[in-house]
Amino acid sequence: MKISELLQKQEVTISCELFPPKKGSELEKAHEIVKEMARVKPSFMSVTYGASGGISEHTVDLANEVQNVNGVMALAHLTCASSGKDKIQEVLRELKERHIENILALRGDIPEHAEFPLPNQYHHASELMEEIKNFGNFCIGGACYPEGHPEAESLEADIDNLKRKVEAGCEFLTTQMFFDNNILYNFLYRTLKRGIEVPVIAGIMPVTNAKQIQRITSLSGTILPQRFRAIVERFADYPAALKQAGIAYATDQIIDLIANGVNHVHIYTMNKPDVAAAIFQNLSEIYHLPN
Ligand code: FAD
């Protein structure tokens, strides 16, 4: 099934995210994580590609495990910063062979000091989307940034680029994490005003350990509301308490989104089935509600 069809149904959807292991020897453990994550029955599971300097070799394998072994729709990420055009063609063929129909097409982060784009690389996600569209019969998603992408000249320029992605074949957008829902509501208003009408899936990051906090605070421009800061300050040195508070904060954000008509939520579960299970349990009556 294509995610675009799922998002057209009048239902709340909640999806999860996985990242592949860096070493092939850890694949078995990753398969176990997929199995545990599948138990919460997410609407779909996405598998990252070359994120945070990681490698891209196991994305197709893990997406296959999600969909063809565990019966959950898979969304395979694909980036053009970490793969040349030949490699992209190869991955598209592999996905097609495994009947994986959904791709989140991204540029990816450019490694420091790297020459980019090389002659055999696409420059922007929109170019990769065109390539995937030409390949045929994939549902294509893309990334969006409620607070603006850090490299964009302005919020308006960033929205113009989003419009370009939609024109290139992007059928849905998933947001970067945000910790204040008003930022998303404001962004949705601006996208609609620009004529972007594809469904937007809200990306929620449950902050459950101190390492994540360091990463988030280093993200330029991310607004951290006082309520979030208070949790970090009070619980940072108490891992179990921080985890509980992070799950509650993410749950609250999701309930507010769904109450306000944002019916599609993607949780950055970061390979933590227990965190996914706790949030899905908190939302057991809300998940699957009609619109
Ligand atoms: P683009 O859409 O190409 O945009 C990048 C920048 O270029 C933006 O500033 C944009 O405004 C600008 N731009 C775009 N088109 C044009 C144009 N035609 N002319 C001028 N400027 C333009 N990274 C990974 O490595 N692997 C992953 O699996 C991964 N998954 C992600 C999932 C989500 C939901 C999100 C939000 C991000 C993910 N990322 C991942 C991170 C992402 O790759 C980075 O944020 C990257 O810096 C931008 O990717 P993009 O696809 O948004 O790029």
Image (cartoon, grey):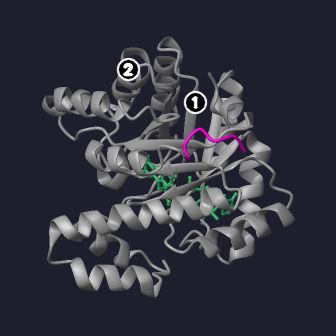
Is residue 90 positioned above or below 244 on the image? above
Residue at x-position 25% and y-position 27%: 31
Q: Amino acid at mark 2?
A: Asn
Label 2 belongs to which residue?
Answer: 70
Q: Quadrant of residue 130?
A: top right
Q: Camera-side residue: 286 or 70?
A: 286
Bin the neighbour count of mark 2 within 10 Å (Cα to Cα): few under 14, some 14-19, many 20 and up: some
Q: Quadrant of the C terminus?
A: top right
Q: Can the viewer see residue 160? A: yes
Main SS of the magenta segment?
Answer: loop
Residue at x-position 59% and y-position 71%: 181
Q: Can the viewer see residue 176? A: no
Q: Secondary structure at mark 1?
A: strand
Is residue 132 one of those drawn in magenta?
A: no
Label 1 belongs to which residue?
Answer: 102
**Magenta span:** 286-291
Which of the four quarters of the rendered structure image does ligand 1 lie in? bottom right
Q: In the displayed structure, does residue 93 sit left or right of residue 193?
A: left
